[in-house]
Image (spheres, rainbow, N blue to C red):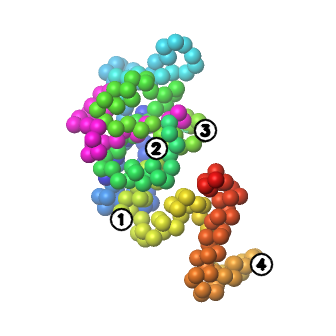
Amino acid sequence: MRIDIVTIFPEFFGVLDISLLGKARTSGLLEVQAHDLRQWTHDRHRTVDDTPYGGGAGMVMRPEPWGEALDALAPDADVSENGPVLIVPTPAGERFTQSLAREFAAEKHLLFACGRYEGIDSRVVEHAETRMRVRQVSLGDYVLNGGEVAVTAMIEAIGRLIPGVVGNPESLTEESHEDGLLEYPSYTKPSVWRDLEVPPVLLSGNHAAIAAWRREQQVERTRRVRPDLLPD
Ligand code: ADE
């Protein structure tokens, strides 16, 4: 998969060099490039923002550098399933979920546009929608200073679903959100630690009993912490 990120802080994405995603990049499963939006400016100060029309607090990112960036990174884009997907992180977007991560993990080319300040001039998305698929996506109901942290989280969630990135694919299916429930609690050795015992069923060797206990734990935890995930 190819991933292009446009940002005014390309150095931020050095974190993607480490751990499993770093390995996936070295092995060629994942090709990630962060591009400095300012390379598509033409004034001496390399300006990317300006005051909002209609007034109000903060600054808005000007459309011209974004337009040039998207032209350069996706010159042959089209709205078909074979074309790239532009993902714009914003608290005003649809919620990023495991199922959206799965959808994006099946794509060949993702483009991420990291806004700063009060966001990007709305015409950028409007124009991009005429020539590629565009998704405005929110990490959750809180506000970050810009899209960089959100994009890092999304790339980690998407990248680990690409076949071959996570060594043991079974570990992907037994996680929170994969089956609509939160995951069950996990334990390892020693069986007693600071007077706390591992639940005896896990030491029983009875696989059916273990599976039933884990399922029960999942349902109980989900009901307690995230009742919104359960069907009515
Ligand atoms: N940019 C700022 N806040 C954000 C959020 N909650 N999700 C995605 N991108 C953002």
- Residue 88 in the magenta stretch? The answer is yes
Callout 2 secondary element: helix
- Residue 218 horizontal/vertical position (percent): 63, 65
Vertical position of residue 30 compared to residue 83: above or below: below
What residue lies at 28% left-to-right and 32% top-to-bottom?
131
Gap between marks 2 and 3, in whole Å?
15 Å
What residue lies at 43% left-to-right and 23% top-to-bottom?
121
- Residue 83 in the magenta stretch? The answer is yes
Q: Is mark 3 within 8 Å of ligand 1?
A: yes
How packed mark 2 is, by other alpha carbons closer than 10 Å (few <14, some 14-19, many 20 or more), is many
Give the magenta part as a residue range. 67-92
Instruction: Give the residue number, with chain letter if any, for mark 1.
Output: 164
Instruction: Give the residue number, with chain letter if any, for mark 3.
Output: 142
Q: Are marks 4 and 1 in contact (CB under 8 Å)?
A: no
Callout 4 secondary element: loop
Residue 151 bears which disc, if any?
A: 2
> Reading the chain from its start, which is encountered first: label 4 or label 3?
3
Q: Residue furthest bottom?
A: 205
Residue 195 bears which disc, if any?
A: 4
Q: Is mark 2 within 8 Å of ligand 1?
A: yes
- Residue 220 horizontal/vertical position (percent): 68, 64
Q: Is mark 1 within 8 Å of ligand 1?
A: no
> Looking at numbered disc 1 in the image, what kind of residue is underneath it?
Gly
Q: In the image, is 192 to the left or to the right of 182?
A: right
